[in-house]
Amino acid sequence: MVEELGKTTEGDLIINVGPQHPATHGVLHLVITLNGETIKNVEPHLGYIHRSIEKMSESLTYRQFIYVTSRMDYLSAHINNHACAMCVEKGLQIEVPERAQVIRVIMDELTRIASHELWWGAMAMDLGALTPFFYAFRERETINEIMEETCGARLTMNYMVPGGVLQDLHPDFQRKVKEFIQLYKRKIHEYDELVTGNIIFQNRMKGVGYLSPEDAVSYGCSGPVTRGSGVSSDIRKHYPYEIYDKLEFDEILETGCDSFARYLVRIREMEQSVRIIEQLIDNIPEGDYQAKTKAVLKLPKGEFYQRVETARGELGVYIVSEGGTTPYRIKYRSPGFSNLSVLNKIATGSKLGDLVAMMGTLDLVIPDIDR
Amino acid sequence: MQNEELKTIITELLPAAAFEEGGEWLNVQVEAADLLAFAGQLRNRPDLNFDYLFCLTCVDWKTHLTMVYHLRSTQYKHHLVLKVKLNRDQPDVETLSAIWRTAEFLEREVYEMFGVNFLNHPDLRLLILPDGWEGKNPMRKDFEDPINMIKL
């Protein structure tokens, strides 16, 4: 896109951010039209990490395709796997043992905390503070270790399989999760002291990136992006899956509609995730961790849709089956794709320096957008 | 609103609409020519208020293409799956980006992956594929790429 560089006739400047840029956290290419310092237009160019996961899944069996989805939103790998496993279970009408359901929910919430931790550190780093990044990784590392022990991997866990989970929990799992919760409670006040209450951060985030509730719905946003605009959208509350309807937790809503509101939603969501884990960690029922399933899975002819709440919003898995061992068509409704589409709307008219704060609070994960 | 009530209202709105059985939600099949007006009514009628288009995609059935729109109402929490059959050789359909803004991006993806031509789309260009890719549609069933194998 070198030819696009340079001034246009109206005195506007077109600049490229990315595809390799530290603030895009991945290979995202933005072509930004500037008038002075004011943004006139932001146009995302995608596809730098497009791997055709949807097409690939068409030639993978219902056991295999789940493994590819860990690579979509790699920070919510568990939750992606969870959505796919549940979609297959819906088609085959498999009943998942209670133990597996509880394990899945604990894993999901640990993933959500780890994802928000990384977002928090990276966003603070984008705005010029390096220290929070190390603080966030201190807690996140503990979660990664827990994952490694039980699932055998730190990021792409592939732990959820149709019918339950791949293997039973590590004997140390409960102890380590409790230790993590202790650590988290001891340290969380540092987050607020370092960033939330910091007047420089507040000035850079308040009133920046205004997203009205109507636009949030019309642009198909989901997750903390809509909840920062006061729109209730938590799939766990509205369309509960697994055991979420039996748990006590709050859906966090903020009405600021700006970057700071989206920031607060994520910070407070971590506390709710800890609350969920605390309810479950001592009450993991005994029993099977996986339902008995056939070696070869064949979904009946038809269409199946399953959605979950990932750390970024609503992930939907749409399977069209012709009755074979592989899906005829799979569509992943990724939360990042829709959240990115609103960037031009909220950035137009702002200063270039604020773009980083907006992108940070949209929490874009590029492999999730490209798929 | 329950599926039966939705069915009654939709039959009143568009007698030509066909209902498909099976599936979790009500499936409605309409003609491409009726789509824009019908979708507008789904969005704007106060008792329907389908304000959230959460999934827009296309399925290649080898003989034809089917556009699939998943809609829900954030107010009433009812769902609807809207389907439009398209001619595979000349897949023209009106854009819905004026009704749901999210459709603008999602339709660009379908345009390049399936070759569906969205009429009156404000900005129908390649989004994911590199420049100069026009004419080949990777998500169609007959697409083969021996160099970059996608099929495993």
Image (cartoon, coloured by chain):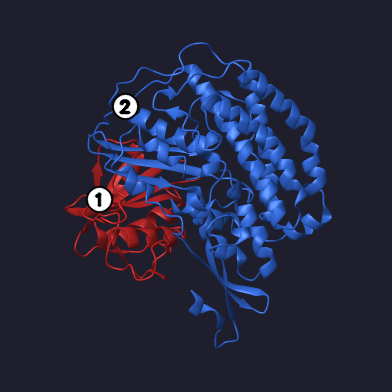
Chain colours: A blue, B red
Left-right relation of A264 to B123: right
The amino acid on which the numbered mark 2 sits, given as a three-letter code, is: Leu
Visible in this render: residue A261? yes
At 49% across and 34% down in the image, what residue appears?
Answer: A239
Residue A283: where, in percent of width, then height?
A: 60, 15
Q: Nearer the viewer, residue B32 or A121?
A: A121
Residue A365 rendering spot, x and y as whole percentages: 54, 50
Front-most of residues A52 and A106:
A52
Mark-to-mark CA distance, 1 and 2: 30 Å
Q: Is residue A143 above or below residue B9?
A: above
Q: Look at mark 2 in the image and give the residue it sits on.
A: A92
Give the amino acid type for the residue marked by disc 1 in the picture: Ala
* On screen, residue B122 above or below A141: below
- The 10 Å Cα crowd at callout 1, few under 14, some 14 to 19, many 20 or more, is many
Percent position (x, y) of residue A218? 50, 56
Which mark, by number, is residue B17?
1
